[in-house]
Amino acid sequence: MRLSIHAVTVGFATAMMVVGCSNPPTGSTTGAAGTQGAAGTQGAAGTQGAAGTQGEAGTQGAAGTQGAAGTQGAAGTGAAGTQGAAGTQGAAGAAGTTGIAGAGGTGAAGTGAAGTTGAGGTGACPTGVLGHCNGDTGAVDKFPGFTLALAEEFDVPINLDTDPIWTWSDGGPPEGQARFQEPQITFANGLMTITAIAKNVPAGLSYAECDKNAKTGQAHGCAVQSGEFRTKYNNYRYGHYEVKLKAPSGENKPGTAFGNYLSTMFSFRTPKLQECNEIDIELEANIKNQVAYNMVNATGQTAYPGGDAGSKTPAGTTNFTVTEAHVYAFEWTPTKVTWYVDGAPLLTNTGATRAIPTNSAKIMMNLWVFASNAAFGDPAANMYPFHADYDYVRFYKWNNETTYPIANPKTGLPAGDVDFAQNNPNEATYP
C-alpha cells in the first residue's frame, strides 16, 4: 500500500506491507433430475418397445431424441416409443445448464447426474484456469492479449489453511493500528468479506512481518483486528488483475466527516524488506469519490521507499463513490501499468520516474487502518465493526509472459520467490 502524498514522511505505510500497530452453489443438484431421465427404462412401455435395449420400438422410438437428456442422454439405445415419453422426463436430466456434464452414455440420463463437473455450482473452471468459476466468470480471452488463469467467484467458502492457492496473513503495517487475523475473513452469499473490529491484539510473533533474512519477526500490539486475503506464493507477474469491490460505508461516528481505512487489491512481493515491489488499488475513507493508485519498485530497503502514488476521480462519472460496488483493475506489462475503473482507463504509468516492477508477487486484498490522521482519514472517528465486500477477483495472464504463474509453485518456484515468504503460523511447512 502507499502513504498518501501528504503522508509519505510517515514511513513504511503500505497497506500491502504487513505488521504492527499503534494503540455451494447448489448447482449440480438440478443435474440430478437425470434420475428421472432414467424413465427411459420405462420407455419400455407401449409396444413398449423394448425401449431400452431394443430401440426397435419403431416409429415410437422417436421419443428417444428427447431422452437425449444431456447431450448423451440420447436414450439412444433406449429409443423408447412415444411412450418412452420418458424422454420428456429425461430432458429434465439435461438439467439444465448445470448438470449437463455427464449425462450418461446410455441415455440413462439418470446416471447423468453429472452435475459434479458441469454445474458451475462446484466451481469447475475452463481447462487451464485455477480457482472457482461460475456463469459470471466470462470468456477466458475477455481482454485481448491476456488469458484467464485464476478466478475466485466466492460462491463457496475457501479453507484458508488448506487451499492450494489462497491463504491469510498474520501481519499488519507497522504504522497502522490493525493486525491481520484469519477470523476476519469470511465467505457468505457469494462474497468474501473482510471485517475490522475494535480488539486489542497483543504484540507477538509474525511470519508475514519477518525480519530481514529471517522467517519470523515481531508485530507490536494493535487496537484493531482486521484481515488480509492473499495468494500463498509470489507466483504472479505480468497480467490483468481485476476485482469487484465495495469499500466500507459505515465506518465513521455520527457527526464526523469520515473515519480512516484503506480497502484494497494489489500485487505485493514478500518479504518486503528485500524487494519492495507492489502495484496498488486503494479505496480510502477520506476520498470516497476518488480511486488511489501506487507503484513501488525498490530493492534493499529498510523502510518504505515511497512510490508513484496519487488518486483520481474516474472520468465521466457523477456521484462516484467507493462505498458502492465497482470493478477495479490494473494491467501490468514490462513497459507500463494501466489502472481501470468499471472498464474505463484511470491512469497509465510508463515508468518515466520509477522503473516498472519486474519481480513476481502475491495477489493481496486487505482492510487496513492507519495509526493517525496523517493519512486516509481520522482514526478517532472510526466506529466498529465495519467491512469491505469482494464479489470476485480474477487474474488474466499476459500472453507474452513466459514464466509466471508456475503450475506447481510449491516445488517449481525459484528459491528467491519463496525464501522468507511464509504467510502465517498455520503453514506447517513452506513452501
Image (spheres, rainbow, N blue to C red):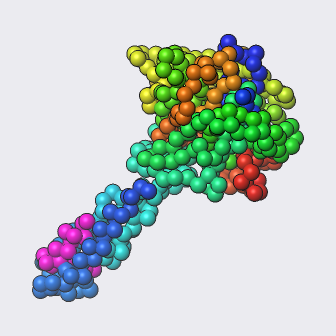
Point 46% across, 16% down: residue: 315
Q: Which x, y percent locates residue 151?
A: 52, 46
* Front-lying residue, 189 or 147: 189
* Front-lying residue, 182 or 230: 182
Point 86% across, 37% down: residue: 212
Point 55% across, 52% down: residue: 158
Q: Is residue 176 magenta?
A: no
Residue furthest out toward the top = 6
Residue 157 sits above or below residue 376 on the image: below
Residue 230 sits above or below residue 67 on the image: above
* Front-lying residue, 320 or 182: 182
Q: Is residue 84 magenta?
A: yes
Quarter occupied by residue 42: bottom left
Q: Does residue 294 appear to the left or right of 90 in the view shown?
A: right
Q: Which x, y percent locates residue 312?
A: 54, 16
Q: Which residues are magenta?
A: 74-92
Q: Does residue 420 appear to the left or right of 285 in the view shown?
A: right
Residue furthest out toward the right = 213
Picture quarter with the N terminus = top right
Point 86% across, 43% down: residue: 214
Q: Which x, y percent locates residue 246?
A: 48, 32
Q: Is residue 86 visible?
A: yes
Quarter occupied by residue 336: top right
Quarter occupied by residue 416: top right
* Front-lying residue, 131 or 14: 14
Q: Which x, y percent locates residue 330?
A: 57, 30
